[in-house]
Image (tube, helix red, strand yellow):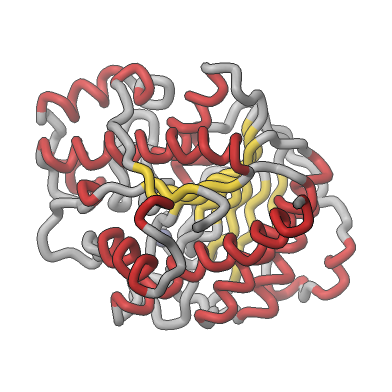
Amino acid sequence: MLPFKLVYSDDYYLPIGAHVFPAEKYERIHKRLIQTGVAEAHDFVTPIPASDQDILLVHTPQYVSKLKTGSLSAHEELQMEIPYSPELVRAFWLAAGGSILAADFALKDRVAFNIGGGFHHAFPDHGEGFCMIHDVAVAIRCMQRDDKIVRAMTVDCDVHHGNGTAVIFAGVRVPTAPLPSRSASVLNPAAGRVRNAHAGDVFTISLHQENNYPTWKPPSSIDVDLPDEIGDDDYLAWLDNALSSGLRQFEPELICYIAGADPYREDQLGGLALTIEGLKRRDELVFHVAHARDIPVMVTFAGGYAQKVEDTVTIHCNTVIAAKEVFSQRSAKSV
Ligand SMILES: [Zn+2]
């Protein structure tokens, strides 16, 4: 039995037809976790859809109304890059409900997963890049509304910049000089660039490939613009640097880790060169940092477009395995 919960529903499946987004990945992850003995049936909990009130904490009434009445313009549907249907709306409301539930469990158990979600390209008033509703932002705003937390941090390791997240939590940002860090000496300044800005009540970190979607990258609290083809060691050094810099500037009560599988070297929509092993080390690093500082972590899966869907499934399952390894150590120590 896992020392944390996995939030999952068969209805996470996105009815988008033949698409580069492998809508069946959630079901396959669920199956693989059970078949390989990583998780048992009772480690999973079933979410209910977010309420409209929850969704409206992040999204505009006009946008929510268009989604519920099927009145998006052709341009808006094109920009979302997934075909509109009432069933798809239900799947996104459910994904948001899953992230709310996972955030709740994370606050109780120190870590929890939504075996889905991470739709970081959704904006308050429109969807983009396969994302209709920003489930992570909805979960954070629900935790704040219910007085469970005041401050949260997003750590976005999808290969694509978290543009929706940056806009939703923009607040008032003032550019600041990057802080020195213990690991800064190992970073090659020519191999990446860090942009810093002060955050409001949610501190946003995004590590992403610079030469990739989205073209316009609104500022996060920390943006790490990575060059093409960066490998495991450089990536991990940048992540370590961003985490330590972020956690010196800000004390979150919840970390929302967006564990995209698309920095993988065989990803069809990504241009970084991480290995499956390197991606697991990435997960371990995030969990070790959170564990050491006793900050709860809620995990969502975001993108993953490996040539072989099985690789995407492996990368996502490894994130669960990494959490099991790190957070089981904690239980063993505390008994
Ligand atoms: Zn992505």
The answer to which of 160 and 286 lies nearer the viewer is 286
Direction from residue 24 to residue 239 in the image, left or right: right
Q: Is residue 154 visible?
A: no
Between 313 and 106, the one lying in front of the other is: 106
Depicted 29 relative to depicted 199: above or below? below
* Residue nearer the viewer, 37 or 318: 37
In the displayed structure image, the side of residue 35 where residue 286 appears, left or right: right
Q: Quadrant of residue 75?
A: top left
Residue appearing at x 63%, y 38% in the figure: 254
Q: Quadrant of residue 225?
A: bottom right
Q: Position of residue 42 (x, y in %)?
A: 39, 51
Outermost residue toward the front in this view: 335
User: Can you give x and y, in whole percent of width and height, for residue 113 in the image?
Assistant: 47, 50
Q: Identify the residue at image location x=54%, y=45%.
A: 298
Pick the front one: 311 or 68: 311
In the image, residue 301 above or below residue 94:
below
Which image quadrant shows ligand 1? bottom left
Residue 334, placed above or below residue 150: below
Q: Residue 164: where, in percent of width, then height?
A: 44, 41
Q: Is residue 18 visible?
A: yes
Residue 284 x/y as whole percent: 65, 66
- Left or right: 188 in relation to 36: right
Q: How many marks?
A: 0
- Image: 106 above or below 60: below
Name the residue rendered at 38%, 53% in the picture. Answer: 115
